[in-house]
Amino acid sequence: MVQLIRNRTIGGILIGILVIVVSKFFFEFVPEPPHVTYTPLFFALKKIIVFNDFIEIAIAVSFVAIQAGLLTFLLHYHKVIKERTFFPFIIYVLVALVYSEQFYLNPASFLNFFMILIIHKMLNLQESGKNPGLLFLDIGTLIGISFLFAKETIYFIPAVLIGVLIVYTYEITNFLIMLLSTFIVLLISAGVYYLSGNISDFLNFFTFTPIKIYVIINHWQERFYILLSILFALVLISYLIFQFKSTSVTNKAKRFAGVFLVFWIVSILVVFVQEVNLWYNMALAAIPASVFASNYFQERKGNNWIKNILFLLLVLGLISVQLNY
């Protein structure tokens, strides 16, 4: 199975699509959405474009597919993964739609979309030379916009700052440009809300749900931890491949592997320490999981039978979680 998908044949693409369809075949409508905190802008957007559950699901799933396609394209464009592969698309959709709640429009999906764009700008930093001001302006603006759709953006700001330090030399001016552009977006938004007489709604942007200082484990099934253990193993092995397989991985990819590792750590922490928006936030692990898992399955060295087993376990684990949810 892994060999067919890796070789990018029509049969491999069809198998990849079949894996996605089969793994989502057990999706069930959520009768009553769980307790979720929305930003006012996201709530207004959802109210405008959603007429019934079927329309919302169609829009949400299409949006996830667009994100998966964009991430796959950018990984190939920046040569983070050496060979073109369908794996990023498959893994992203599998992880981003684990739970039934994720089939609906949700803040995590919008946050992922903007994070993919931010990662693209960060990748461009390595080729920007000595004048990266516009890229930092773009990154700051995207952070500000994403914050209007998802409060969880606040947790990823440190990840972006650390990522910039990894891929580009530290300059206080560039960081000020990035933070200033973020502030300007929020300031303009505050002005719009003030003029419309809804400034109190804007202030709710800064009212965050409490963060638990202990790991929340009672919300998850045992099979979820098995699935998460598989993802952890894939991330660790793939990160080692990024760092030590110098013949098959570019120096740019090696450096940026550290950025994806930071995003992975932050996304997992958000999943475990924030109880509200719990089911949606699992999708935040989709970006780094897609990169690392794709790199592992695409690597031609090693035993293919082990990779086939791990890929099968990953798919069956996702199906199991959805079946018994």
Image (cartoon, rainbow, N blue to C red):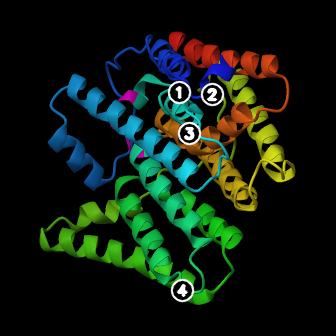
Q: Are marks 2 and 4 in contact (CB under 8 Å)?
A: no
Note whether 112 is above or below 325 in the view shown.
below
Residue at mark 4 to residue at mark 3: CA–CA distance: 32 Å
Q: Is residue 272 among what the camera can see?
A: no
The residue labelled by disc 4 is 131
Disc nearest the viewer among 2 and 4: 2
Residue at the extreme bottom: 173
Q: Nearer the viewer, residue 43 or 165?
A: 165
Q: Amino acid at mark 4?
A: Asn
Instruction: Tally the numbered discs.
Output: 4
Residue at position x 65%, y 42% in the image: 83
Tell me whether the residue at label 1 lies in contact with that at label 2, contact meaning CB atoms closer than 8 angstroms.
no
Marks 4 and 1: which is nearer the front?
A: 4
Foreground tag (2 vs 3)? 2
- Is tag 1's residue or tag 2's residue first in the polypeptide sequence? 2
Q: Earlier in the sequence, mark 2 or mark 4?
A: 2
How far across and how far down the image is residue 57, in percent?
30, 27
The residue wearing badge 2 is 7
- Residue of label 1: 94
Magenta part of the chain: 103-107
- Name the residue tied to disc 3: 286
